[in-house]
Amino acid sequence: MGRLFWEVAAGEARQELRTAGFPRARQEPVSPVGSRKKPLEMRAPGAGAASREGIADLGGGVFQLPTDYPAVCNAPLWSYLVASGGKFALIDPGVRSTRTATLAAAVSAAGLDPAAADLVIATHGHPDHSGGQRSWADAVPGVRVAAPLEDVPWVESFDRQWVRCWDDYPGTLDLRAGRADLEALCVPEPTVDLMLRDGDTVQVGGRGRELAVVQTSGHTWGHCAYLDRQTGALFTGDAVQGHGTRSSDGADVFAPMYVDVAETRRGLRRLAGLPFTLLCPAHVPPMSRDDGLAFIQDSLDFVDEAEALARDLVRQKAPGPVLTRDLCLVIARLTGTDPPVTPQVVATARAHLYALAREGLLEAAWLPAPGDQDRPATGPSG
Ligand SMILES: [Zn+2]
């Protein structure tokens, strides 16, 4: 595997880079959202609704539930419960430890029997959203595990997710030292019972309550949002990220993360066109329709701003190469992310570089980096 770099045009600069080589920079291990350096106490959800033990009753049988993720990875995270006929669906049930740490007790406090779980459904395959599914499958016989079609390989195999996601930025970001921490969030993996496609409808509890599947690729290739037709609650996972999410301790900002610019815009516009009454993101407390529409617009604005920065950088660097890392530094300045080269920033920077390469403004090239031949394709390392 080689070093990823970008340049304005083929020519001398390319030749020079191809032969010069780079020392490999090792990055600090980073969790999918957040650093483990500053574990914090869990914060209560901020929905403003009646809260008992950190649970928010959002009305109509929809509850916001606390997770242990703030303590595990210094990032806010909530799960959502949709009740139907004594049974319930859990949307994004956190990481492997979350069921026993917070969710089982929270489900009881919401007036439901944790053994009555009918559906655990992930908006996408990142460990903080799908990592908790297996624990519910083990604890509750018959519970259905659901995930978006294109993210199923990641949900069912951390090895695949590692290769195609976290270890996919050679020369820019090296997370191998943090692999075991990531793995601990989501292994053992579940087997997915329901592969969700755009336009599908998923029944909850067999009483006619339905979640409509709306594909919003961009954050991951398969990401889906779910609309509860009964209340208008729209569960958006990580599709709507604004200008980033502040860490639980307030000291840093997790930048918006996406792998494809066009899909991200398309997904956000689709969400804006839905008849939702309440927007329920994973890392941000729920909000009203008006605030939700503003948050979606803020997310679209971020994509525009990041694109403008990428175009400026390409102009400034011409005719020399543009490294993924160069754009990371610029985007991190926009979001206030420090240190700047994180999984979120790197994915987003590369998405913008690919978008400009599709326009013909850049040519993609991969420079062999010393030592990369040691990188295993799969399997533990570190
Ligand atoms: Zn995510």
Image (tube, rainbow, N blue to C red):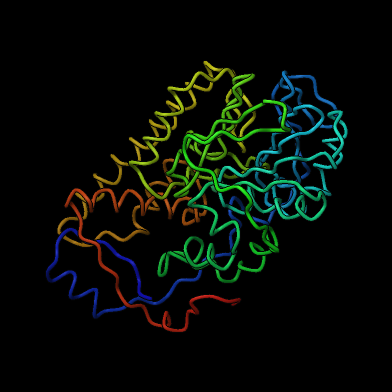
In this rendering, the answer to whether 123 lies above or below 2 is: above
In this rendering, the answer to whether 180 lies above or below 330 is: below
For the C terminus, give its image quadrant.
bottom right
Farthest-out residue, left: 11
The residue under the point 42% across, 35% down is: 267
The residue under the point 42% across, 32% down is: 268
**Residue 164 in the image, given as x and y percentages of width and height:** 47, 63
User: In this orientation, does residue 264 appear?
Assistant: yes
Left of 234 or right of it: where is 302?
left
User: In this orientation, does residue 240 appear?
Assistant: no
**Residue 189 in the image, given as x and y percentages of width and height:** 67, 60
The residue under the point 71% across, 21% down is: 58
Please tell me which residue lies in front, 255 or 378.
378
- Give the number of callouts: 0
Left of 176 or right of it: where is 130?
right
Please tell me which residue lies in front, 313 or 120.
120
For the N terminus, give its image quadrant.
bottom left
In this rendering, the answer to whether 84 lies above or below 365 is: above
The residue under the point 45% across, 51% down is: 345
**Residue 322 in the image, given as x and y percentages of width and height:** 26, 59
Please tell me which residue lies in front, 52 or 36.
52
**Residue 376 in the image, given as x and y percentages of width and height:** 50, 79
